[in-house]
Amino acid sequence: RKEVEQDPGPFNVPEGATVAFNCTYSNSASQSFFWYRQDCRKEPKLLMSVYSSGNEDGRFTAQLNRASQYISLLIRDSKLSDSATYLCVVNKKYGNKLVFGAGTILRVKS
Amino acid sequence: DVKVTQSSRYLVKRTGEKVFLECVQDMDHENMFWYRQDPGLGLRLIYFSYDVKMKEKGDIPEGYSVSREKKERFSLILESASTNQTSMYLCASSPIAGERVDEQFFGPGTRLTVL
């Protein structure tokens, strides 16, 4: 079983749609959770951190369910510029190492 | 802005060659990482370093070595390149953040092709 699992997609949605991505992780001792965004042929960049019960940043909402070891990312009012691969990221049990999911591809179309 | 630079964007080498990938960060970060990214597998950690001259193996260290002689520079070495090392190589850095894991900042990547 992979340490971090994501639906690879692609999710093809029209502009203005709401879309949600899910991610599960296997290490119950994980303490830090992130969503990174990676544009085509570019490096990953932090989209948002997910601490405690989740947080919101503009059109983006991240939720964490520790009991089910599940993280979600909700994007409201999708824009063409949201098209990218979204990586679910979890820290290893000890230290500053991260485990990256393989990513979910989002394509927003006009 | 944090800046992580990598020596090459694209590199083509032949099987058996020794390959050096260089990474430099300008934010005085203690931690530096080397990943490879392959379709369907995501980013996998090869090696990381939490201080000068310190290194630890990641999940896939076989066939690789690293060097960190200065805080800002972290080098990945392929002693004898093989075709299965064809991949995108990404360097990252992050500060020490106590018990909380901090954001990692990535370089633009080096796409290595081994023929």
Image (spheres, rainbow, N blue to C red):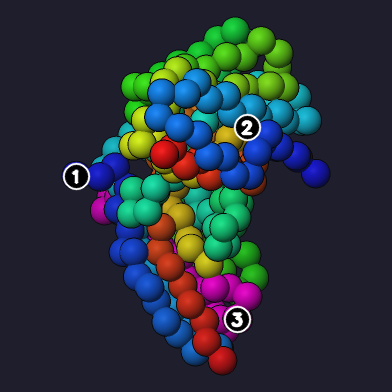
Q: Is residue A76 above or below residue A9?
A: below
The circle on residue B93 is 2
* Residue on which disc 3 sits: A80
Q: Distance from label 1 to label 2 (Cα)?
A: 28 Å
Q: Amino acid at mark 1?
A: Arg
Q: Is residue A64 left or right of residue A110?
A: left
Do tag 1 and tag 2 residues touch (Cβ < 8 Å)? no
Percent from the top left, x then y, of residue B112?
51, 40
For the residues tagged 3 and 2, is the chain the same?
A: no
Judging from the image, mark 3 belongs to the subunit labelled A
Q: Is residue B13 left or right of residue B39?
A: right
Taking depth in this image into account, of A16 and B69 the one nearest to the observer is B69
Percent from the top left, x then y, of residue B82?
37, 30
Looking at the rendering, which quadrant does residue B107 occupy?
A: top right
Q: Amino acid at mark 2?
A: Ser
Q: Amino acid at mark 3?
A: Leu
Taking depth in this image into account, of B87 and A53 the one nearest to the observer is B87
Q: How many marks?
A: 3
